[in-house]
Amino acid sequence: MSQIDTATKIIQFIHHYSSPELFEELPILIHEAFKLADEDSRGRIKHCALRQSRKRSQDRYFYVQDAVCNAQSGWRPSIQVTENEGESYTELETANMLATIHVPSWSSGKVRPAKYRAKNARHNIGICEQLALQLEAKSTPEKAKNFEKLNLIIVAQAPSPEQQQDGPAYIQVRVPHENNKGYHLIIDIDELLAGYAAAQPPVEPEDQAWPRLRKQMRQAESNESNEQND
């Protein structure tokens, strides 16, 4: 039997251990935030399109971070303060996942480096091994305490100037490498949601599936690093 690729196994994990409501709610909140940022910039700045665009871009980030604080589908929102004085972001947490939201500019489309994203990405190194412990029928409190969460980045891409400005161009779910220099998974949130209808529990035994995935995630990062160095 051919080996299932790392991205597919991660999708299986998300489908099997989280409810679709978690990912149904986020686009609603994000779209509302984009719409509010667009309406506010148009209403307050009337004489300069450049200033209007700049205010809209800045407001999107703040309104999105504030909007997801209202998540009620199972996420536990918390406001985190960064080392840069006056800066903050919203962290979304469940028993198995840790997510943050990013709004890349239309010109770059890239998730900018940040210390907190690099820190959160390190959760992904032990997700599979720790999940195997969590799934044990006789898991001890000590084992559960050490469980590492799967780290996600929710990317709400800002639209280009030619597109409608009251909503994101797309929303993606990304799973970063442990070193935060690449991704195990990049998937449109609608595609992730659509997969719930046909999702099946992992077919491998519990004592084999997640240790294999942990090894596979590490090997995928190593292979990508070797390819870049060639």
Image (cartoon, grey):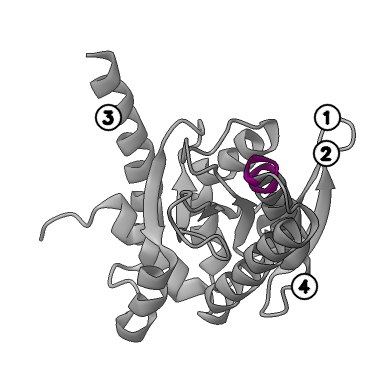
N-term mark: 3 or 2: 2
* Residue 84 point in image, percent of width and height: 83, 29
Whole-Å distance between the Cαs marked 1 and 2?
Answer: 6 Å
- SS of the residue at dot 4? helix
Direction from residue 18 to residue 62 in the image, left or right: right
N-term mark: 4 or 1: 4
Direction from residue 114 to residue 45 in the image, left or right: right
Whole-Å distance between the Cαs marked 4 and 1?
Answer: 25 Å
N-term mark: 3 or 4: 4
Q: Residue at x 33, y 28 (%)?
A: 222
* Residue 158 point in image, percent of width and height: 53, 51
Quadrant holding the C terminus: top left
- Tally of numbered discs: 4
Q: Which residue is mark 1?
A: 84
Q: Residue at x 36, y 51 (%)?
A: 213
Question: Which portion, as a residue range, is magenta?
Answer: 49-54
Q: Which residue is mark 4?
A: 70
N-term mark: 1 or 3: 1
| CB-based contact (under 8 Å), mark 3 and mark 4 | no
Whole-Å distance between the Cαs marked 2 and 4?
Answer: 19 Å
Q: Which residue is mark 3?
A: 223
Q: Nearer the viewer, mark 3 or mark 2?
A: 2
